[in-house]
Structures are given as C-alpha cells and as structure tokens.
Amino acid sequence: MALNDSVLAAIGNTPLIKLRRASEETGCTILGKAEFMNPGASVKDRAALGIITAAIERGELRPGGLIVDGTAGNTGIGLTIVGNALGMKTVIVIPETQSQEKKDALRSLGATLIEVPAVPYRNDNNYVRVAGRTAQRLAREHPEGAIWANQFDNVANRDIHVRTTGPEIWQQTEGGIDGFVSAIGTGGTLAGVAEALRARRAGIAIALADVPGAAMHSYYSSGELKAEGSSITEGIGQGRVTANLEGFQPDHSFRIADAESLDIVYRLIREEGLALGLSSGVNIAGAIRLARELGPGKTIVTMLCDPASRYQSRLFNPDFLRAKGLAPPDWLEQPQVVKP
Ligand code: PMP
C-alpha cells in the first residue's frame, strides 16, 4: 500500500511542544506530543491505521468491507477516516454519554452510528460487547465481509505505538528523555510507547496518570482492580487489564482529580494558546507529578491527545460544569468590556 498517496500519510510524525508553565514550575523540560494534529484530530488515528493495516495484511479486510468497533468516539473517527481512504465503511458503537461533538463528527464522516446506554463492561449491553456481536453478524450478512477492530484487545493498537510513537519521541528528544506519562483508555499508547522507550533506555521512568472511576491506579499500586469516584474525562478510564496492557507495569502511578486537569486545560488556553481536551490535562498533571518525583533537570514527555473543540458543549458550558461540581473558566463568565 502506498501510504503517501492518501490522507494516511498525514498520520503520525507529530511535533513535540514544550509546555512552558509545567516546565517552569518543575524545573524540568515537559514536552507534549501534538496528537491533535493528526487528520482525525486525535492520537487514535494511529491505532486505527495499525488495526486496519494488520487486518488487510491478514487477508481479513478488503475494499468494500465493513469495520465495526466500540469507541468513545476518537477511535471511530480514526477508523472512519482510514476506512474512507481505503474504500471501507464503518459501523461505530458509542456510549450515549459521549460528547455531541464526537457523535456529530462521526455522522459527518459517514459512519453508521449505534448509540447504546453507558453500562459496565461486565454487562452484556456494554458498547464493546455490542460491537463484537454486531461485527459477528455483519461478517455473515455483508457480501464483502466485516471485521471487529476490537481496539481494547487487538494488539495491533499497541504495536503501532511501538513502531511509530515511541521511536518518534526517542528521535525528537535525541535520546535525552527521562520519563513518559500517559493515561489509559485501551492502554495501547502507554504500553506501546513504554515498550519502545524501555528497549532504547533501560530505567526510563514510565508513569500512569489515572482518573477517578478508573481501576488501573489501584491495580498497579496494590494489585486490586478497584474503582472509586467518577470523572468527566472522555476516552480514558479503564477497569480491566486489556490485551494491550498484558505484560505491562508502570514505574509510577498517579490519580488526577478533574479540578486539577481542568485547571491545566484552561490555563494552557489562556497562557500558551494550546486548546486541548481533558485527557491531555490529565496527562500533563501526571507529567508534573513525575517531574516532582524525578527532580529538576529531567526531560518528560506526555501526549496531547485531542483538541478542546471536541468538548465545546461540556468544558466551556458553565451549566454542565456546575452540575458536575466544577468551576467554569473565569473568562467565560466575565462581561465583555470592550465596546464596538
Ligand atoms: N485521550 C483520548 C481523548 C482518547 O480518546 C483516548 C483513547 N480512547 C486516549 C486518551 C487513550 O489512548 P489509549 O486508548 O491508547 O490508551
């Protein structure tokens, strides 16, 4: 496949951006990988490309075929962009609690959307299980066949980070990287980048930034899958050891409250002109914690997963925020003082 002939050439090779305030506050160099610059505007374009390419190579997917997956939205957007470029259609199962912006983006791109109630993984009607069953049925019914992308347990997701994201970070820092931090959705990013970086520098510090309501911080700290509280962060927050996480263990683990990650997101907009989604705020909060543990002078990289615009109706909606017990950014509520 000649990747340069299509939009697929624009996936990956994202810049590393210095995060000024986080760096100044800690005396470290904290860098963010600008994954929001991918064509589907998120880190999940990489996983989509990895999963679809692997399925084509195995002979399971061809033009005309269907790609089915359960996703919080970003993977669905990535799968649809890659699928459109290669002549395949997508059927995306999404929990109805995800942002309207992501659902609208999916419909605009031509995905068939199935919205399901947000229920835990153990429930038969969980979006991941619905996607698996739907794919099985469509594989029988659709003349050109169908695959279940299965991003959580398909290690083609982790592998693309081993082959692209990790080596890019190593090259961009010229091997001068001391730590890497990421939240976990599927775990593909954290486990994949960790594998690539540990192979190049034994002893590099790998850290998890977890949200309330997820079980991985508890799992990696005490061995117990225990989830407490909740978070408005979309796309992250895992409750089980996915296949992408098998064999992985972080060196550090932090739990980040929504008020902390939101404050980072709002300040980055006003002070550095970077408008990011909340999982990026979680990642940067984790990078600051890791910087404090490692001490000044270190270089730490994290992921800037997607843009703030994907959550306009939530992160910039005072009513939504107050209903969640969170403070809206002050500039949204201040009267406009400049008269025309
Ligand atoms: N941030 C956002 C906004 C996401 O959509 C995702 C993926 N669901 C992640 C972070 C986590 O990435 P991964 O699935 O590789 O763990």
Image: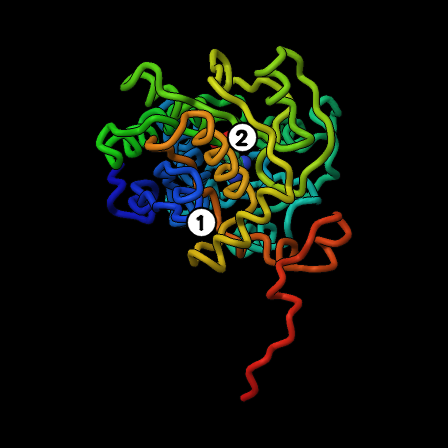
Q: Is mark 2 within 8 Å of ligand 1?
A: no
Disc marking residue 41: 1
Residue 145 in sight in this render: no
Q: 338 or 135: nearer the eye?
A: 338
Q: Secondary structure at mark 1?
A: loop
**Residue 269 drawn at (x, y percent):** 49, 57
Query: Which residue type does callout 1 highlight?
Result: Ala
Q: 188 or 280: nearer the eye?
A: 280
Q: Secondary structure at mark 2?
A: strand
| Other residues around mark 1 within 10 Å, as few (<14) / some (14–19) / many (≥20) | many
Taking 193 as reference, is 212 left or right? right
Taking 30 as reference, is 152 left or right? right
| Other residues around mark 2 within 10 Å, as few (<14) / some (14–19) / many (≥20) | many
Disc marking residue 228: none
Residue 186 in sight in this render: yes
Could you tell me if the residues under marks 2 and 1 are in contact, i.e. CB atoms within 8 Å? no
Residue at 47% over, 15% down: 248
Residue at 22% over, 32% down: 174
**Residue 53 drawn at (x, y percent):** 37, 31
Query: Which residue type does callout 2 highlight?
Result: Ala
Marks 2/1: CA–CA distance: 21 Å
In the rendered image, which residue does mark 2 sit on? 209
**Residue 76 drawn at (x, y percent):** 53, 41
Q: 89 or 200: nearer the eye?
A: 200
**Residue 185 drawn at (x, y percent):** 55, 31
- Figure quadrant of the C terminus: bottom right
Q: Using the image, determine if residue 219 lies above or below residue 65.
A: above
First of labels 2, 1 by sequence position: 1
Residue at 54% over, 30% down: 209
